[in-house]
Structure formats: C-alpha cells, structure tokens
Amino acid sequence: MKSNPVVAIAGVTGAVGAEFIATMDKRAFRVGKLKALASARSAGKTIDFRGQKVVIEELNESSFEGVDIALFSAGGGISRKFTPIAVKAGAVVVDNSSAFRMDPNVPLVIPEINADRIGDHKGIIAVPNCAAITVLVPLWPIHRRNRIKRVILSTYQAASGAGAAAMQELVESTQASLNGQAFQPKAMPYPYIIHRFIAMSGKASCPRIGPAMSARKKQISVNRPPAVVCRSPHERSDMRVRYVRKASPGYRFAHPGYACWASTG
C-alpha cells in the first residue's frame, strides 16, 4: 500500500461518510488524494477536507480508476453493484453495509478483536453492524478469559443509525414539537421525538427510541461459568471492571465500580 494512498468515499454526504472524514483527520491518516463520491443529486457540491474544497463526483463505473482504498457506506445495493468494480480497478474496499457480512469469502473485521483477518481479504473487508462492534469489543477480553455461554442483548438505537436524513428529521421534528406545530415524518415511520418503534430478532431487541442523535445504549446479560473465587459479589464485579478496562482500549467506565461502559470512539 502506498504511503499516501488515493482514498475514495462512496456515500460521502451521509452520516457515516462524514465520520470517515472526521476519523481520518483525528488519526492523521495519510491521504494523497480524496475522491468524494455520492449520488447524482450531490454531484458538483463540495466538502471541506484538510483546508481544501473537494468537489463531489457522481458514483459510476469509472469512479475507482487509480483508487487505492475505497470506503463504502451507501447501502447494501450500492455496495453489491460497485464494490466488484472497485476491486477490479485495484482498490481495497472496506464496506460498512450489510452486503458482505455473511459472505464466507469476505473477512468480517473488528480490529480490536481479529485484525489478523485483514490479511485474508481478496479485495473486500466487511465491517459488522455498529451495535455489534461496541458490544463485542468489551466482551471479547471477558470471553478470552472465561468463555461466554450466552448473551442477551437489547440495543436502544439513535437517529444516526438511520442516516443523515433521520438526524436532520430529529432536529426538525424537535423544533416543531417545541413550537407546538404538527410534523409529518419522511425518513422515519413515526415522529421520532415522541415515539419508539421496535424490531426484534432472536435474542436481541432493538428499539429506536427518541430523542437521541447519535448515542446508543446497550443492555447486556452475559452467562458464563465462574472464573475465580471472590470474597463478595462487589469484589467479583470490581475484578471484572478492572480487567475489561485494561483489555478494552477506547472505552471508559460510565459508573466506576460497576460493569457499565461507554465507547469513546
């Protein structure tokens, strides 16, 4: 890989596209050139990147010529259509959609857990769902020390999980509610400011509950055999907290002394 790679972002105008750019800046990731890709309606607009204006281009079959790294977050359909084109052009694709998560030939990577799988890629690296990532990173060191038998997880999703349009709708619907005005939602099935709606699958329940812009809450119940003998439940909880804190970089404990954490990433 080049020391100053050409990076393309497919879905640059979305909420995740903005986070791609913010994260590259935060980590001082070297970029020789940024290609900002989006739909035809955004083509010609500009975004700010490291003091320069970058013109957004329409995503098409010729977008990936000369690209070294392609970051995709434009939905599964777009990924399935354009990812093979990007790989054929010579790019390594990191896909944030659900398109390749269940593909046995595509490594599904959380760097804090299985970064070694990156080397197995054949052009595409898949990224798990954001709720799965933030839960698994602190659970992984526990599982390595004492195998987890079962996890029951409830996630409380924020507006950002539905994209930039939902985030903007939360702002507009909140303003309308405060002004006593009616509001007709478009991005969400219901007015997000006062409702919650739930999708359930297996042992996971996933309410989208408002108003929350980007923070997500997880309630986790873990079953595993006892690993150590402690004098009291408090001592056992304290040991777990200290171990997870040490083994899970990027997380802080919201309530010291209890197994409750918050992602800082």
Image: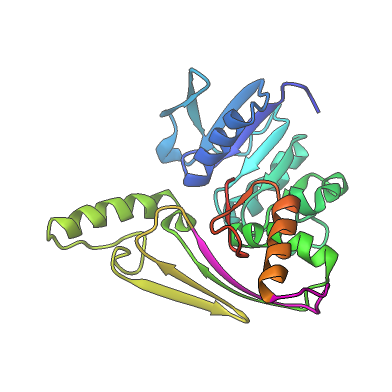
Residue 236 placement (x, y as % from top left): 72, 70
Magenta residues, start to end: 216-232
Question: Which residue occupies the extreme left position in the image?
Answer: 180
Q: How is the image coloured?
A: rainbow
Residue at 63% in and 39% down: 61
Residue at 61% in and 61% down: 257
Residue 218 sits above or below residue 69 on the image? below
Residue 218 appears in the picture as rendered = yes
Question: Which residue occupies the extreme front position in the image?
Answer: 231
In the figure, residue 35 lies in which quadrant?
Answer: top right
- Locate residue 17 relative to residue 195 in the image: left or right: right
In the rendered image, the quadrant that contains the C terminus is top right
- Locate residue 129 relative to residue 165 in the image: left or right: right
In the rendered image, the quadrant that contains the N terminus is top right
Residue 100 appears in the picture as rendered = no
Residue at 66% in and 24% down: 31
Residue 111 placement (x, y as % from top left): 75, 48
As for residue 231 lying within the magenta part, the answer is yes
Residue 17 versus residue 40: which sits nearer the camera?
17
- Locate residue 127 relative to residue 60 in the image: left or right: right
Residue 35 sits above or below residue 174 on the image? above
